[in-house]
Image (tube, rainbow, N blue to C red):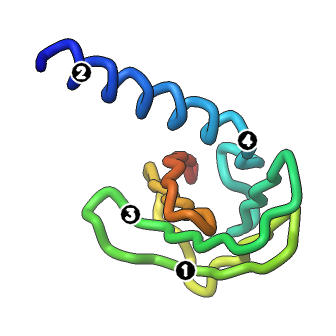
Amino acid sequence: MKKIILMILMINFFWLKLLANDCILYPNPCINQKINISFEKTQNKIEVYVYDVAGKLIENKRIFYSKILTINFNQKLAKGIYLVVIYDENDNKIFKKFIVK
C-alpha cells in the first residue's frame, strides 16, 4: 500500500513539474503594475488568480484560446511577494510567484 501511495505522489509531482514548465511569468520582479504569463502552447481555457502573502485575492482573469495573458493590476501593488495560481481546462494547478519591489 505504501508503494502505491508513493507512486501516486511521484506521478502527481511529475505532472505538476511538467505543467509548471509549460508557462513563464515575466517580468519578475513586476514592473509598472503589469505581469505577463506566456504558455508554451495555446490554452483552451485558463483561470488565473493572484493573491498577496496574506491570502487576499488581488486579481482574477479568465482567458480562452490564447498563448499569452497580460494582467494590468487595477490597484497599486504593495512591495512584497505574490502568488499566482493558474488552473487549466482540466483543473490542473500551476503555482508561480512574483515580486513587487
The residue under label 1 is 60
Q: Nearer the viewer, mark 1 or mark 2?
A: 2
Residue at 53% in and 79% down: 59
Mark 4: which amino acid?
Asp
Give the class, few, some or many, for how many residues have Cα within 10 Å of label 3's Cα (few <14, many ≥20). Answer: some
Q: Amino acid at mark 3?
A: Asp
Q: Which residue is mark 2?
A: 4
Q: Nearer the viewer, mark 4 or mark 2?
A: 2
Element carrying mark 1: strand
Cβ–Cβ under 8 Å for marks 3 and 4: no
Residue on which disc 4 sits = 22
Residue pictured at 68% horizontal, 44% vertical? 28
8 relative to 63, above or below: above
Task: Assess whether mark 3 and mark 2 are in contact (beta carbons under 8 angstroms).
Answer: no
Q: Residue at x 79, y 64 (%)?
A: 43
The crowding category of the residue bearing disc 2, from other C-alpha atoms within 10 Å (few below 14, some 14 to 19, many at least 20), is: few
The residue wearing badge 3 is 52
Q: Nearer the viewer, residue 85 or 79?
A: 85
Of pointers 4 and 2, the one earlier in the residue sequence: 2
Give residue 29's quadrant in the image: top right
Residue 98 percent location from the top left of the image: 56, 48
Q: Please tell me which of labels 4 and 1 falls first in the chain.
A: 4
